[in-house]
Image (cartoon, rainbow, N blue to C red):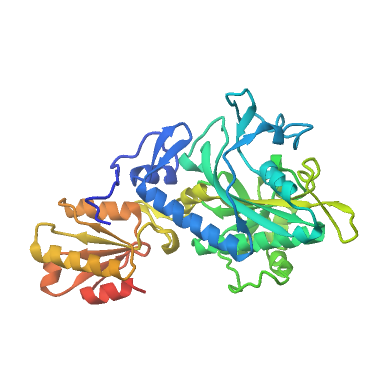
Amino acid sequence: MRLSRYFLPTLRETPSEAEIASHRLMLRAGMIRQSSAGIYSWLPLGYKVLRKIEQIVREEQNAIGCQEILMPTIQPADLWKEGTGSGRYDDYGPEMLRIKDRHDRDMLYGPTNEEQITEIFAASARSYRDVPKLMYHIQWKFRDEVRPRFGIMRGREFLMKDAYSFDLNATAGRISYNKMFVSYLRTYERMGLTAIPMAADTGPIGGDMSHEFLILADTGESEIACHKDFVDRKLADKDIDFDGDLQPIVDSYTSQYAATDEKRDLDAEKALGDDLVTARGIEVGHIFYFGTKYSKPLGAVVTDSDGKEITVEMGSYGIGVSRLVGAIIEASHDDDGIIWPDAVAPFKAGIINLKAGDDACTQACDDAYNNLLSKGVDVLYDDRNTRAGAKFADMDLIGVPWQLIIGPRGLKSRTVELKHRSSGEREEISLESAQTQLLV
Protein backbone atom coordinates (compact mmCIF):
# COMPACT_ATOMS: atom_id res chain seq x y z
CA MET A 1 0.00 0.00 0.00
CA ARG A 2 1.26 3.47 -0.90
CA LEU A 3 1.04 5.75 2.08
CA SER A 4 -0.03 8.66 -0.14
CA ARG A 5 -3.26 6.70 -0.80
CA TYR A 6 -3.69 5.10 2.62
CA PHE A 7 -6.11 6.48 5.20
CA LEU A 8 -3.75 6.92 8.14
CA PRO A 9 -4.73 9.99 10.19
CA THR A 10 -1.77 10.08 12.58
CA LEU A 11 -1.59 12.64 15.38
CA ARG A 12 1.51 14.47 16.56
CA GLU A 13 0.05 15.35 19.98
CA THR A 14 -1.35 12.90 22.52
CA PRO A 15 -5.10 13.32 23.10
CA SER A 16 -5.83 14.48 26.64
CA GLU A 17 -8.33 11.67 27.33
CA ALA A 18 -5.76 8.90 26.74
CA GLU A 19 -4.46 7.59 30.08
CA ILE A 20 -2.44 4.52 29.09
CA ALA A 21 0.09 3.72 26.39
CA SER A 22 -2.14 1.60 24.15
CA HIS A 23 -4.89 4.23 24.08
CA ARG A 24 -2.40 7.01 23.33
CA LEU A 25 -0.62 5.10 20.62
CA MET A 26 -3.73 3.71 18.93
CA LEU A 27 -5.15 7.21 18.63
CA ARG A 28 -1.86 8.73 17.51
CA ALA A 29 -1.21 5.93 15.00
CA GLY A 30 -4.62 6.41 13.40
CA MET A 31 -5.85 2.94 14.36
CA ILE A 32 -9.13 3.91 16.02
CA ARG A 33 -11.42 6.90 16.52
CA GLN A 34 -13.95 7.26 19.31
CA SER A 35 -17.59 7.23 18.29
CA SER A 36 -19.00 7.62 21.81
CA ALA A 37 -17.85 6.70 25.31
CA GLY A 38 -16.29 3.23 25.15
CA ILE A 39 -17.26 2.69 21.49
CA TYR A 40 -14.73 3.00 18.66
CA SER A 41 -14.47 2.88 14.90
CA TRP A 42 -11.59 0.75 13.66
CA LEU A 43 -9.64 2.51 10.91
CA PRO A 44 -7.63 0.63 8.24
CA LEU A 45 -4.41 0.17 10.23
CA GLY A 46 -6.19 -0.93 13.41
CA TYR A 47 -8.64 -3.13 11.56
CA LYS A 48 -5.77 -4.90 9.80
CA VAL A 49 -4.15 -5.80 13.12
CA LEU A 50 -7.51 -6.84 14.56
CA ARG A 51 -8.10 -9.27 11.68
CA LYS A 52 -4.62 -10.78 12.01
CA ILE A 53 -5.22 -11.48 15.68
CA GLU A 54 -8.67 -12.86 14.89
CA GLN A 55 -7.19 -15.23 12.31
CA ILE A 56 -4.62 -16.63 14.75
CA VAL A 57 -7.39 -17.23 17.28
CA ARG A 58 -9.51 -18.90 14.58
CA GLU A 59 -6.71 -21.20 13.42
CA GLU A 60 -5.95 -22.38 16.96
CA GLN A 61 -9.61 -23.03 17.69
CA ASN A 62 -9.95 -25.02 14.48
CA ALA A 63 -6.84 -27.02 15.41
CA ILE A 64 -8.59 -28.55 18.43
CA GLY A 65 -11.72 -29.45 16.49
CA CYS A 66 -13.75 -26.44 17.59
CA GLN A 67 -16.35 -25.59 14.93
CA GLU A 68 -17.05 -21.99 13.97
CA ILE A 69 -20.59 -20.64 13.92
CA LEU A 70 -22.01 -17.12 14.12
CA MET A 71 -24.68 -16.14 16.62
CA PRO A 72 -26.62 -12.85 16.60
CA THR A 73 -25.74 -9.79 18.64
CA ILE A 74 -29.38 -9.33 19.69
CA GLN A 75 -30.89 -12.10 21.84
CA PRO A 76 -34.44 -12.74 23.14
CA ALA A 77 -34.66 -11.95 26.83
CA ASP A 78 -36.69 -15.13 27.46
CA LEU A 79 -33.46 -17.15 27.17
CA TRP A 80 -32.20 -15.30 30.23
CA LYS A 81 -35.37 -15.04 32.35
CA GLU A 82 -36.42 -17.22 35.26
CA GLY A 83 -38.78 -19.98 34.17
CA THR A 84 -38.03 -19.72 30.44
CA GLY A 85 -34.25 -19.57 30.50
CA SER A 86 -31.17 -19.44 32.71
CA GLY A 87 -32.50 -17.00 35.32
CA ARG A 88 -29.64 -14.54 34.79
CA TYR A 89 -31.74 -11.70 33.35
CA ASP A 90 -32.23 -9.85 36.63
CA ASP A 91 -28.91 -10.94 38.15
CA TYR A 92 -26.66 -9.68 35.37
CA GLY A 93 -27.07 -6.05 36.37
CA PRO A 94 -26.93 -2.71 34.54
CA GLU A 95 -24.07 -3.79 32.24
CA MET A 96 -26.69 -5.60 30.13
CA LEU A 97 -28.27 -3.35 27.49
CA ARG A 98 -31.98 -4.22 27.59
CA ILE A 99 -34.22 -3.16 24.69
CA LYS A 100 -37.69 -3.79 23.28
CA ASP A 101 -38.52 -4.51 19.66
CA ARG A 102 -41.50 -2.99 17.81
CA HIS A 103 -43.77 -5.75 19.14
CA ASP A 104 -42.85 -4.85 22.73
CA ARG A 105 -40.86 -8.04 23.20
CA ASP A 106 -37.94 -7.88 25.63
CA MET A 107 -34.60 -8.22 23.86
CA LEU A 108 -31.00 -7.59 24.83
CA TYR A 109 -27.64 -6.87 23.21
CA GLY A 110 -25.63 -9.96 24.09
CA PRO A 111 -22.89 -9.51 26.69
CA THR A 112 -22.11 -13.23 26.33
CA ASN A 113 -23.70 -16.27 24.65
CA GLU A 114 -24.09 -19.17 27.10
CA GLU A 115 -27.87 -19.07 26.84
CA GLN A 116 -27.99 -18.72 23.05
CA ILE A 117 -25.58 -21.58 22.33
CA THR A 118 -27.28 -23.86 24.87
CA GLU A 119 -30.65 -23.27 23.20
CA ILE A 120 -29.11 -24.12 19.82
CA PHE A 121 -27.60 -27.34 21.15
CA ALA A 122 -30.73 -28.34 23.10
CA ALA A 123 -32.91 -27.98 20.00
CA SER A 124 -30.70 -30.31 17.96
CA ALA A 125 -28.84 -32.84 20.11
CA ARG A 126 -30.59 -36.06 21.09
CA SER A 127 -28.12 -38.86 21.73
CA TYR A 128 -24.84 -39.47 23.53
CA ARG A 129 -23.45 -39.78 20.01
CA ASP A 130 -23.96 -36.01 19.62
CA VAL A 131 -21.24 -35.26 22.18
CA PRO A 132 -18.59 -34.12 22.69
CA LYS A 133 -19.01 -30.88 20.75
CA LEU A 134 -16.90 -27.73 20.73
CA MET A 135 -18.29 -24.63 19.01
CA TYR A 136 -17.13 -21.03 18.85
CA HIS A 137 -17.87 -17.74 17.22
CA ILE A 138 -16.11 -14.39 16.92
CA GLN A 139 -18.67 -11.67 17.45
CA TRP A 140 -19.17 -8.18 18.84
CA LYS A 141 -20.37 -7.92 22.43
CA PHE A 142 -21.78 -5.01 24.41
CA ARG A 143 -21.46 -4.42 28.13
CA ASP A 144 -22.59 -1.05 29.43
CA GLU A 145 -19.56 -0.28 31.61
CA VAL A 146 -20.29 2.35 34.23
CA ARG A 147 -16.93 3.95 33.51
CA PRO A 148 -15.45 2.97 30.16
CA ARG A 149 -11.78 3.92 30.02
CA PHE A 150 -8.37 3.00 28.66
CA GLY A 151 -9.62 2.99 25.07
CA ILE A 152 -10.37 -0.49 23.79
CA MET A 153 -9.01 -2.07 26.97
CA ARG A 154 -12.21 -1.33 28.84
CA GLY A 155 -14.75 -0.34 26.23
CA ARG A 156 -18.46 -0.98 26.04
CA GLU A 157 -18.38 -2.65 22.62
CA PHE A 158 -15.70 -5.24 21.93
CA LEU A 159 -14.86 -8.17 19.66
CA MET A 160 -14.69 -11.49 21.44
CA LYS A 161 -14.08 -15.12 20.65
CA ASP A 162 -16.34 -17.20 22.83
CA ALA A 163 -16.38 -20.98 22.65
CA TYR A 164 -18.58 -23.57 24.35
CA SER A 165 -18.14 -27.25 25.14
CA PHE A 166 -20.81 -29.93 25.52
CA ASP A 167 -19.87 -33.25 27.12
CA LEU A 168 -21.56 -36.35 28.50
CA ASN A 169 -19.96 -36.20 31.95
CA ALA A 170 -17.48 -34.30 34.10
CA THR A 171 -14.53 -36.46 33.02
CA ALA A 172 -15.16 -35.66 29.36
CA GLY A 173 -15.76 -32.03 30.32
CA ARG A 174 -12.28 -31.86 31.83
CA ILE A 175 -10.82 -33.10 28.54
CA SER A 176 -12.51 -30.25 26.67
CA TYR A 177 -11.33 -27.79 29.32
CA ASN A 178 -7.74 -29.00 28.97
CA LYS A 179 -7.89 -28.67 25.18
CA MET A 180 -8.86 -25.03 25.54
CA PHE A 181 -6.27 -24.42 28.24
CA VAL A 182 -3.42 -25.62 26.03
CA SER A 183 -4.90 -24.02 22.91
CA TYR A 184 -4.84 -20.65 24.66
CA LEU A 185 -1.18 -21.04 25.55
CA ARG A 186 -0.40 -21.72 21.88
CA THR A 187 -2.58 -18.83 20.71
CA TYR A 188 -0.79 -16.23 22.81
CA GLU A 189 2.66 -17.59 21.99
CA ARG A 190 1.92 -17.15 18.29
CA MET A 191 1.24 -13.48 18.99
CA GLY A 192 4.57 -13.02 20.72
CA LEU A 193 3.01 -12.99 24.20
CA THR A 194 3.70 -14.96 27.35
CA ALA A 195 0.35 -15.56 29.02
CA ILE A 196 0.21 -16.82 32.60
CA PRO A 197 -2.79 -19.02 33.53
CA MET A 198 -4.13 -18.23 36.99
CA ALA A 199 -6.93 -19.78 39.02
CA ALA A 200 -9.75 -17.25 39.10
CA ASP A 201 -13.24 -16.49 40.38
CA THR A 202 -16.01 -17.37 37.96
CA GLY A 203 -18.07 -14.19 38.40
CA PRO A 204 -21.50 -13.99 36.73
CA ILE A 205 -20.66 -16.85 34.34
CA GLY A 206 -20.75 -19.33 37.24
CA GLY A 207 -19.10 -22.70 37.69
CA ASP A 208 -16.47 -24.29 39.90
CA MET A 209 -13.32 -24.26 37.76
CA SER A 210 -11.87 -21.22 36.06
CA HIS A 211 -8.57 -19.78 34.84
CA GLU A 212 -7.67 -16.32 33.68
CA PHE A 213 -4.82 -15.80 31.22
CA LEU A 214 -2.84 -12.66 31.93
CA ILE A 215 0.15 -10.98 30.32
CA LEU A 216 2.49 -8.82 32.36
CA ALA A 217 2.35 -5.07 31.74
CA ASP A 218 2.98 -2.07 33.98
CA THR A 219 -0.47 -0.66 33.20
CA GLY A 220 -2.33 -3.89 33.98
CA GLU A 221 -5.49 -3.60 36.05
CA SER A 222 -4.74 -6.63 38.23
CA GLU A 223 -1.91 -7.08 40.68
CA ILE A 224 -0.63 -10.61 40.38
CA ALA A 225 1.96 -12.83 42.01
CA CYS A 226 3.62 -15.87 40.46
CA HIS A 227 6.66 -18.08 40.36
CA LYS A 228 9.47 -16.46 38.38
CA ASP A 229 9.51 -19.37 35.90
CA PHE A 230 6.27 -18.07 34.40
CA VAL A 231 7.76 -14.77 33.21
CA ASP A 232 9.44 -16.16 30.07
CA ARG A 233 7.90 -19.61 29.95
CA LYS A 234 7.12 -21.22 26.59
CA LEU A 235 5.40 -24.44 25.68
CA ALA A 236 8.04 -27.15 25.52
CA ASP A 237 6.20 -29.15 22.86
CA LYS A 238 5.04 -27.19 19.83
CA ASP A 239 3.51 -30.21 18.05
CA ILE A 240 0.82 -31.09 20.55
CA ASP A 241 -1.49 -34.06 20.05
CA PHE A 242 -4.85 -32.65 21.08
CA ASP A 243 -6.38 -36.11 20.95
CA GLY A 244 -3.88 -37.30 23.54
CA ASP A 245 -3.66 -36.74 27.30
CA LEU A 246 -3.15 -33.02 27.92
CA GLN A 247 -3.41 -33.24 31.71
CA PRO A 248 0.39 -33.35 32.23
CA ILE A 249 0.79 -30.06 30.32
CA VAL A 250 -2.01 -28.43 32.32
CA ASP A 251 -0.56 -29.77 35.56
CA SER A 252 2.88 -28.40 34.72
CA TYR A 253 1.36 -24.90 34.61
CA THR A 254 -1.13 -25.15 37.46
CA SER A 255 1.26 -26.83 39.91
CA GLN A 256 3.35 -23.66 40.20
CA TYR A 257 2.10 -20.65 42.10
CA ALA A 258 0.27 -17.95 40.12
CA ALA A 259 -2.58 -15.89 41.56
CA THR A 260 -4.61 -12.78 40.92
CA ASP A 261 -5.65 -10.31 43.64
CA GLU A 262 -8.57 -12.28 45.03
CA LYS A 263 -6.74 -15.64 44.99
CA ARG A 264 -3.40 -14.66 46.52
CA ASP A 265 -1.97 -16.75 49.36
CA LEU A 266 0.55 -14.79 51.44
CA ASP A 267 1.94 -17.89 53.14
CA ALA A 268 2.60 -19.54 49.78
CA GLU A 269 4.25 -16.37 48.52
CA LYS A 270 6.49 -16.16 51.56
CA ALA A 271 7.59 -19.75 50.97
CA LEU A 272 8.66 -18.92 47.41
CA GLY A 273 11.26 -16.43 48.64
CA ASP A 274 13.37 -15.09 45.77
CA ASP A 275 11.35 -17.12 43.27
CA LEU A 276 8.34 -14.85 43.79
CA VAL A 277 7.48 -12.21 41.19
CA THR A 278 4.84 -9.55 41.82
CA ALA A 279 3.67 -7.44 38.92
CA ARG A 280 0.63 -6.07 37.17
CA GLY A 281 -1.23 -8.07 34.55
CA ILE A 282 -3.78 -7.64 31.78
CA GLU A 283 -6.44 -10.29 31.35
CA VAL A 284 -6.57 -11.51 27.75
CA GLY A 285 -8.62 -14.68 28.18
CA HIS A 286 -10.83 -16.54 30.64
CA ILE A 287 -12.01 -20.15 30.63
CA PHE A 288 -14.81 -21.65 32.75
CA TYR A 289 -16.18 -25.09 33.51
CA PHE A 290 -19.68 -24.81 34.96
CA GLY A 291 -21.26 -28.23 34.56
CA THR A 292 -25.06 -28.07 34.19
CA LYS A 293 -25.61 -24.41 35.19
CA TYR A 294 -27.14 -23.62 31.77
CA SER A 295 -27.91 -27.02 30.31
CA LYS A 296 -30.28 -27.95 33.14
CA PRO A 297 -32.67 -24.93 32.99
CA LEU A 298 -32.53 -24.81 29.19
CA GLY A 299 -33.15 -28.53 28.72
CA ALA A 300 -29.91 -29.55 27.01
CA VAL A 301 -30.17 -33.31 27.52
CA VAL A 302 -29.13 -36.38 25.57
CA THR A 303 -29.94 -40.07 26.05
CA ASP A 304 -27.21 -42.54 26.91
CA SER A 305 -26.83 -46.03 25.41
CA ASP A 306 -29.54 -47.31 27.77
CA GLY A 307 -32.02 -44.59 26.85
CA LYS A 308 -31.54 -42.68 30.10
CA GLU A 309 -31.63 -38.86 29.86
CA ILE A 310 -28.43 -37.10 30.85
CA THR A 311 -28.01 -33.35 31.25
CA VAL A 312 -24.86 -32.40 29.37
CA GLU A 313 -21.85 -30.79 31.06
CA MET A 314 -20.68 -27.44 29.70
CA GLY A 315 -17.84 -24.96 29.72
CA SER A 316 -17.22 -21.58 28.09
CA TYR A 317 -13.99 -20.04 26.88
CA GLY A 318 -13.42 -16.40 26.01
CA ILE A 319 -10.63 -14.43 24.35
CA GLY A 320 -10.88 -10.66 24.04
CA VAL A 321 -9.83 -10.26 20.41
CA SER A 322 -10.08 -6.47 20.30
CA ARG A 323 -8.60 -6.16 23.81
CA LEU A 324 -5.56 -8.13 22.62
CA VAL A 325 -4.66 -5.30 20.24
CA GLY A 326 -4.28 -2.97 23.20
CA ALA A 327 -2.66 -5.61 25.39
CA ILE A 328 0.05 -6.32 22.82
CA ILE A 329 0.82 -2.61 22.60
CA GLU A 330 0.99 -2.33 26.39
CA ALA A 331 3.52 -5.18 26.42
CA SER A 332 5.48 -4.02 23.37
CA HIS A 333 6.17 -0.31 22.82
CA ASP A 334 8.76 2.37 23.47
CA ASP A 335 8.86 6.18 23.57
CA ASP A 336 8.68 6.35 19.77
CA GLY A 337 5.63 4.15 19.26
CA ILE A 338 4.36 0.62 18.84
CA ILE A 339 6.63 -2.41 18.36
CA TRP A 340 4.49 -5.08 16.70
CA PRO A 341 5.41 -8.78 16.95
CA ASP A 342 5.82 -10.09 13.40
CA ALA A 343 2.72 -12.31 13.50
CA VAL A 344 0.27 -9.45 14.11
CA ALA A 345 2.04 -6.51 12.45
CA PRO A 346 -0.16 -4.65 9.95
CA PHE A 347 2.71 -4.67 7.45
CA LYS A 348 5.96 -6.64 7.47
CA ALA A 349 8.03 -3.79 6.07
CA GLY A 350 7.89 -0.10 5.35
CA ILE A 351 9.77 1.48 2.46
CA ILE A 352 10.90 5.05 3.09
CA ASN A 353 11.70 7.18 0.05
CA LEU A 354 14.04 9.83 1.39
CA LYS A 355 13.68 12.07 -1.66
CA ALA A 356 10.39 11.62 -3.47
CA GLY A 357 11.33 14.11 -6.22
CA ASP A 358 14.49 12.27 -7.22
CA ASP A 359 13.95 10.06 -10.27
CA ALA A 360 16.56 7.45 -9.41
CA CYS A 361 15.43 7.22 -5.79
CA THR A 362 11.77 6.94 -6.76
CA GLN A 363 12.52 4.29 -9.36
CA ALA A 364 14.49 2.20 -6.86
CA CYS A 365 11.67 2.48 -4.31
CA ASP A 366 9.00 1.62 -6.89
CA ASP A 367 10.96 -1.40 -8.08
CA ALA A 368 11.53 -2.68 -4.54
CA TYR A 369 7.87 -2.12 -3.64
CA ASN A 370 6.56 -3.97 -6.69
CA ASN A 371 9.05 -6.80 -6.28
CA LEU A 372 8.23 -7.38 -2.60
CA LEU A 373 4.50 -7.25 -3.30
CA SER A 374 4.88 -9.81 -6.07
CA LYS A 375 6.65 -12.12 -3.60
CA GLY A 376 3.80 -11.86 -1.08
CA VAL A 377 5.42 -9.39 1.33
CA ASP A 378 2.93 -6.92 2.82
CA VAL A 379 4.60 -3.52 2.38
CA LEU A 380 3.70 0.05 3.30
CA TYR A 381 5.49 2.42 0.93
CA ASP A 382 5.96 5.99 2.17
CA ASP A 383 5.98 7.77 -1.16
CA ARG A 384 4.81 11.11 0.24
CA ASN A 385 6.59 14.31 -0.65
CA THR A 386 7.37 15.28 2.92
CA ARG A 387 10.44 15.63 5.09
CA ALA A 388 12.42 12.55 6.07
CA GLY A 389 12.02 13.17 9.80
CA ALA A 390 8.25 12.92 9.54
CA LYS A 391 8.55 9.66 7.61
CA PHE A 392 10.85 8.13 10.22
CA ALA A 393 8.56 9.25 13.04
CA ASP A 394 5.46 7.76 11.40
CA MET A 395 7.13 4.42 10.70
CA ASP A 396 8.33 4.17 14.30
CA LEU A 397 4.92 5.23 15.58
CA ILE A 398 2.96 2.57 13.70
CA GLY A 399 5.53 -0.09 14.56
CA VAL A 400 6.24 -1.84 11.25
CA PRO A 401 8.90 -4.50 12.06
CA TRP A 402 11.30 -3.58 9.22
CA GLN A 403 12.12 -0.27 7.57
CA LEU A 404 13.80 -0.21 4.17
CA ILE A 405 15.30 3.26 3.80
CA ILE A 406 16.29 4.34 0.28
CA GLY A 407 17.98 7.65 -0.47
CA PRO A 408 20.02 9.19 -3.29
CA ARG A 409 23.26 9.24 -1.29
CA GLY A 410 23.12 5.52 -0.55
CA LEU A 411 22.18 4.64 -4.11
CA LYS A 412 25.39 6.25 -5.35
CA SER A 413 27.30 3.57 -3.40
CA ARG A 414 24.63 0.98 -4.30
CA THR A 415 23.46 0.60 -0.69
CA VAL A 416 20.28 1.08 1.31
CA GLU A 417 19.62 1.03 5.02
CA LEU A 418 17.60 -1.73 6.70
CA LYS A 419 16.32 -1.00 10.21
CA HIS A 420 14.81 -3.48 12.62
CA ARG A 421 12.15 -1.70 14.69
CA SER A 422 12.36 -3.94 17.76
CA SER A 423 16.13 -3.96 18.27
CA GLY A 424 16.81 -0.58 16.64
CA GLU A 425 19.70 -2.15 14.72
CA ARG A 426 20.55 -0.65 11.33
CA GLU A 427 22.73 -2.03 8.57
CA GLU A 428 23.84 -0.72 5.21
CA ILE A 429 23.53 -3.40 2.58
CA SER A 430 22.70 -3.73 -1.09
CA LEU A 431 19.09 -3.28 -2.16
CA GLU A 432 19.04 -6.86 -3.43
CA SER A 433 20.28 -8.23 -0.08
CA ALA A 434 17.75 -6.16 1.84
CA GLN A 435 14.90 -7.54 -0.24
CA THR A 436 16.17 -11.08 0.17
CA GLN A 437 16.22 -10.62 3.95
CA LEU A 438 12.62 -9.38 3.93
CA LEU A 439 11.51 -12.51 2.08
CA VAL A 440 12.57 -14.76 4.97
293 versus 175 height, above or below? above
Instruction: State the residue in front, 343 or 140.
Output: 140
In the rendering, at what x and y percent does residue 413 appear? Answer: 12, 74
177 versus 431 height, above or below? above
180 relative to 145 in the view: left or right: right
Placement of the C terminus among the 4 image quadrants: bottom left
In the rendering, at what x and y percent does residue 207 appear? Answer: 76, 47
Residue 96 can be seen, yes or no: no
Toward which corner of the image does residue 205 lie, by quadrant? top right
Residue 16 can be seen, yes or no: yes
In the rendering, at what x and y percent does residue 362 appear? Answer: 14, 62
**Which residue is drawn at the image coordinates 66% and 45% (left, top)?**
261
Q: How many marks?
A: 0
Toward which corner of the image does residue 165 lie, by quadrant? bottom right
**Which residue is drawn at the image coordinates 23% and 76% (left, top)?**
432
In the rendering, at what x and y percent does residue 158 appear? Answer: 52, 42
Toward which corner of the image does residue 304 lie, by quadrant? bottom right
Instruction: State the residue in front, 361 or 244.
Output: 244
Placement of the N terminus among the 4 image quadrants: bottom left
**Which residue is drawn at the image coordinates 43% and 61% (left, top)?**
341
